[in-house]
Amino acid sequence: FNTAVNHRLELRLPVCEICWLKDKINFKIIKHFENITWKKCAGPCTSGFRAGQRTFRASNWRFVCIRIIDNSYNYNRFRALTLSVAQDEMHLCLLSLLLLLMGGNGLCQQEEVCSKSVINTCNDCIRSGPYCVWCQQLNFTKAGEQEAARCDTRAQLIARGCKTKEIISPHNSQIINQDNPLSSSFKQQEAVQLRPQKISLKLRPGLSTKFNISFKRVQGYPVDLYYLMDLSYSMQDDLENVKGLGQRLFAALKNITAHAQIGFGAFVDKTVLPYTNTNEGKLRKPCDENYQQCQAAFGYRHVLSMTPREDDFRNEVNRQFISGNLDSPEGSLDAMIQAAVCGDKIGWRNSSTRLIVLTTDAGFHMAGDGKLAGILEPNDEKCHMDNNLYTKSSEMDYPSVGQLAMQLEKNNIQPIFAVTKNMETVYKQLSKMIPKSEVGVLSHDSNNVVQLIESAYNRLSSKVTVTHDNLPEKVKVVYTPICTNPGPARDSEGVCDNVHVGQEIAFEVTVTAHSCMENQSFTIRPLGIKETLTVSLSTNCECQCEDPSDSNHTHCNRKGGVSCGICSCHDGFVGQFCKCAIGDKDERTLQASCQRQNGTECEGRGDCVCGRCKCHTTESGKSYHGDFCECDDDHCEKFQNKLCGGNGECNCGKCDCNEGYEGSACQCKKSQRDCQTLNNTVCFGRGTCQCDHCQCKEGYQRPHCKLCLGCPDPCQTKQNCIECLGFDSGPFKKNCSLACSKTIFHMMVDQFTIATKQCQHKDSEGCWIKFKMDQLFGEEYSAEILKQRDCPEPPSVIAIIGGSIASVALIGIVLLMLIKMLIHMRDLKEFKKFEDEKKKSKWAKAENPLYQDATTTVANPTFTGE
């Protein structure tokens, strides 16, 4: 609100605008509802102002009373608003605040709109929008009016004469099926912290309903705490402190509840490379050589199931020794998801607050990291524990953060991450993705772990978050907290903070179904708490009409019964009142005859009665017309906001102008003064004169359609006609007079007299024809053709042949000479090479061992010399 110096105050509400003056009240109404009226009260005003459930009084105000009648919202109830004129600006501001409170409680209601689509029955109407209602009153529709007119808002139907008792409008309903009272303390039986426990809703699509749920944390509610510790080598000092932690930890839990249990588990990482050294000796003893008390490498081991005995916890933890691995991140997510899904082995109770305390000084591996070790099988989120060891550690990948968050939420487990300072940022980012989780910073030796658990538990227990599971499609749920420290209203969850034990809080739940559904359900529950509210949901999409029992009602010509105010005809009869007997004809055949080009029946503007369209009336009271109701007389072009300019009648979407008027909207008087050309034609015959302006044919330019810049060149388009008209040759020689003489008036001349561009065309005989053209009226031309054509002399055949032979001979001789020259040059080169080698050679004298002389001497062996 805003106050000015002159004590003028303006208050804007969703529907109305109120202007306040010092000595009088002036209301300016922006009408969103047609049936809202403002009247002055007849009787005296009371000395009070009521907003919702609160009454405000002031004895020194002068009162003026205004009554608001809102028939659109509640037709049988009146709301009265008392306004006053105060004496100072302070009272004006106070009064404005009260008006705002009143406006927030429904004084200015949201506008109700019925957005109708295709409406044939009452059920179609109810499903089309939350504010659509149906009038079942007989004879409600007028002659020619479609039955869809029965569907509208309540205010509109009442204004059109429908009786209130004849209006069909399904309402929302809710039934609380189970509502056990909240428990005040835990007494070894199932405590009730959430009410109600079961509720059934019957909703109309699009129309919201509200109900409240209450929650109270029970004093002494059981707590199950599972201590999950990192036993990698870097946590050696922390393990020694945890071994003496039992007494302090149990004492801290006893301060919270007398029904506390503790379990213990340990983890390191997967026993495969590159996470752990797979050398046989290193698998047995992964610690340093100097450290003797070292247990074999493992992924996750469950050590102690839930127990209320301190001695059991101390004894089992004292048996634990440190282990080791190679890389820095650990397999903490593997351990947490197994602790969540292996409930029977861990020992989680059904009715308890479940906590997992994870202590570590390192980061964590998550889904996808297993590929480094060749592990490709995704985590299946199932329990794989044998002899208290996680058996699928080396076969399945790490879980994703989403998988872990889902299983923790599903099993109502709240994690507390107790980590060292260097890991605080990492686990705070992880905590944002896991509902109902907390992060605390450990000291260097985990000495402060008990205080850390206490503070984290207090933060978790004081924050109540309500959400839902298994929400059906097209259902919206919004939570509005009703408590001392509420969070914002949201459609995913509702939050109340700083809630003490035994303090009762509430949430307003708004449920909206946006489509029809049957026998659906979802659950609403506080995170970390087992108890749930089961919401059964169905919708009201059917009309419950009070129909007459007579199956041969007089309203339906005794050929059918009445269903929600409209006739349901017997077989063989159709029509609004069952007056059409179709006999042997099929009803689809009759409907097809009412469809134009297989389109909508009667264009959606009428009803098909006995195979003919019976057209509806338009909004102006006129009727659609035409064989298929395709015409109406309300949608012609307007001029000066008048249909057909007020100078004609609208006929089937086009204006029929009165005598002396023309134009698409009859917007101008008939005249051709500005369309006349110098040669006393209208638009040169290349356009029409409309509204004293030339409407030229395509390509021709205004104002008088004389030039055509985009038209084809007549020198090209008319050249065949010029040839046949001037020289009786060319393609049009045989029908020249028929094709050309009516559009071209030609003259044979020695010199041109027309001042246009000269055209030149080569005819079929190879001669050049020169001519000029001038466009006359329309597509008629005058042409001047030079008598003398330019025909070039024919070429000499003998010269061409002789020249060709000589050219060939010359080319041949040249080629031979080139070849001869190339061969000669190659021979010279080879001879020169031979001479060079000859000069370099040196001859040596020697006898050939293979040589035999041609003369052979033979001695007679018997010759004695005598």
Image: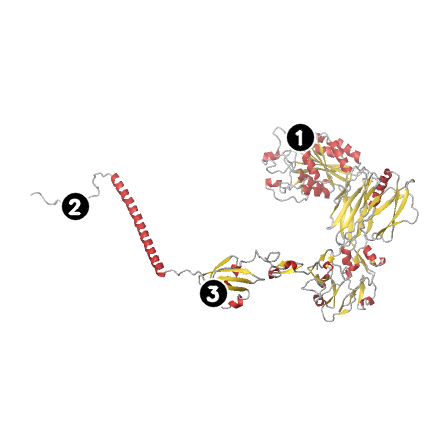
**Residue 426 falls in image quadrant:** top right
Mark 3 Cα-neighbour bin, 10 Å: few <14, some 14–19, many ≥20: some
Of pointers 2 and 1, the one earlier in the residue sequence: 1
**Residue 776 falls in image quadrant:** bottom right
User: SS of the residue at dot 1?
Assistant: helix
Up-down: is 489 above or below 810? above
Q: Nearer the viewer, residue 492 or 468?
A: 492
Query: Which residue carries the number 3 mark?
Result: 727
Say which of marks 2 and 1 sits in front. Answer: 2
Of pointers 3 and 2, the one earlier in the residue sequence: 3
User: SS of the residue at dot 3?
Assistant: helix
Query: Which residue carries the number 1 mark?
Result: 236
Residue 64 pos. (x, y %): 89, 45
User: SS of the residue at dot 2?
Assistant: loop
Task: Calculate the distance from the C-alpha at mark 3 to the C-alpha at mark 2.
Answer: 107 Å
Task: Calculate the distance from the C-alpha at mark 2 to the C-alpha at mark 1.
Answer: 115 Å
Query: Of the residues shown, which amino acid type is indicated by label 3?
Result: Phe
Say which of marks 3 and 2 sits in front. Answer: 3
User: Which mark, by number, is residue 854?
Assistant: 2
Q: Nearer the viewer, residue 473 or 808?
A: 808
Mark 1 Cα-neighbour bin, 10 Å: few <14, some 14–19, many ≥20: some
User: Is residue 186 visible to the viewer in this orientation of the structure?
Assistant: no
Say which of marks 3 and 1 sits in front. Answer: 3
| Dot 2 and dot 1 residues touching (CB under 8 Å) | no
Kindly identify the residue that appears in the image at 72 percent across and 65 percent down. Answer: 626
Of pointers 3 and 1, the one earlier in the residue sequence: 1
Query: Of the residues shown, which amino acid type is indicated by label 1?
Result: Gln
User: Is residue 29 visible to the viewer in this orientation of the structure?
Assistant: yes
Task: Calculate the distance from the C-alpha at mark 3 to the C-alpha at mark 1.
Answer: 118 Å
Residue 168 pos. (x, y %): 82, 57
Query: Of the residues shown, which amino acid type is indicated by label 2?
Result: Ala
